[in-house]
Amino acid sequence: MKNKVETILIAISLWIFILIIMFPILNIISVSLRTDNAFQTKSLSLFEVAEKFTDENKNGKYDFGEQFLDSNQNSKWDSGSSMKSYLELFSSTPFLKWTYNSIIVSLIVTLTGVLFASIGGYAFSRFKFKGRQFGLLTILSTQMFPATMLLLPFFILLSKLQLIDSFIGLIIIYTSTALPFCIWQMKSYYDTIPTDLEEASRLDGCNQYQSFYKIILPLAKPALVITALFSFMTSWSEYVIAAIVLQNPDLYTLPLGLKSFQASLSTQWGLYAAGAVVVSIPVTILFISLSRFLVSGLTLGSVKG
């Protein structure tokens, strides 16, 4: 009886947790499917309904001439649910340009982060050199400070290098802020791979580079995937640094582009919500497609006898 009660309580807690997580997502989707007029004078609640009308002919839909409650006072009945925001997002805004910019920046940051993290993590894991411990402590200590604290030094550095308002400057900052965590993560994973595997490959004629490329990297796929995801997410959805570095609207990434829908006196909620939904799709697909690599445990017990 006690176990049954505990199971029920756990199930209820999980459902409450899921609902708390899903509510803002469902709310954003709901807002993206409404017409612009449907929420100019109303709250952005999840269960917003269409404007009310007097269904004189009782056919369940609004017909021209029927009286209706014109909540937004635009002299026409609005259904409250439409794909208009999505159509306008792709046809009337530079959304595709923002997407292209974000893809370019995110891919370069991801490739750079994976490359340097895989090499740097291996060096810290396998080699003993002067300053190794200090380097590890330095990498770890950088994670104690938020990236926003480094905005001023980064801005001064990029100004001196004349890299303000350029993708190169943005990529440098994104890579440098993501790299310490990625190196530490790869180093920790390399530590779990037995060195006997490399020694066995040396007996078979492999040098250090071949052992790393042919033996260690394939076994480190789960860590490489997590590193790639972290690097991609760092640049795909980041706003604050991009707002400081990029000033030319032609260089805007997706977060900056979505922010442009918000003016000083009004916000285009339909476009904003539709853009947020579209932006989340690539990340969701990426997580689902790479989820099979997130299960580790590929290395133990595979020592050559």
Image: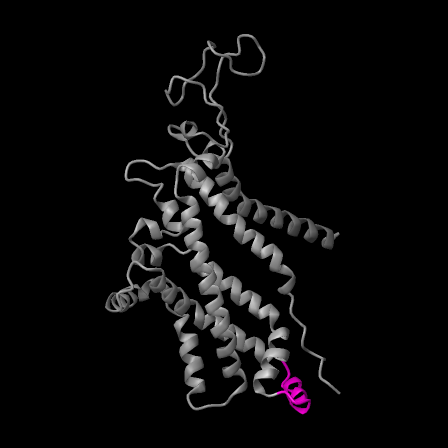
Is residue 214 visible from the viewing direction of this image? yes
Q: Give the answer, above or below, for where 129 lies relative to 265.
A: below
Question: Disc count in the image?
Answer: 0
Q: Which residues are magenta?
A: 193-206
Q: Is residue 265 left or right of residue 113?
A: left
Q: Indicate the quadrant where residue 77 lies.
A: top left
Q: Give the answer, above or below, for where 45 lies relative to 131.
A: above
Identify which residue is drawn at 27% across, 64% down: 155
Q: Quadrant of the C terminus?
A: bottom right
Identify which residue is drawn at 53% across, 74% down: 186
Is residue 146 visible from the viewing direction of this image? no
Give x and y (percent) for residue 84.
47, 31
Query: For this rendering, which residue is in front, 289 or 87?
Result: 87
Here the colouring is one colour
Give x and y (percent) for residue 179.
44, 71
Q: Give the answer, above or below, for where 273 lies relative to 191.
A: above
Query: For this rendering, which residue is in front, 106 or 182?
Result: 106
Q: Is residue 195 magenta?
A: yes
Q: Is residue 22 magenta?
A: no
Query: For this rendering, which residue is in front, 204 or 123?
Result: 204
Q: Is residue 156 left or right of residue 235?
A: left
Q: Give the answer, above or below, for where 72 lies relative to 124.
A: above
Give x and y (percent) for residue 238.
40, 56
Identify which residue is drawn at 28% across, 66% down: 158
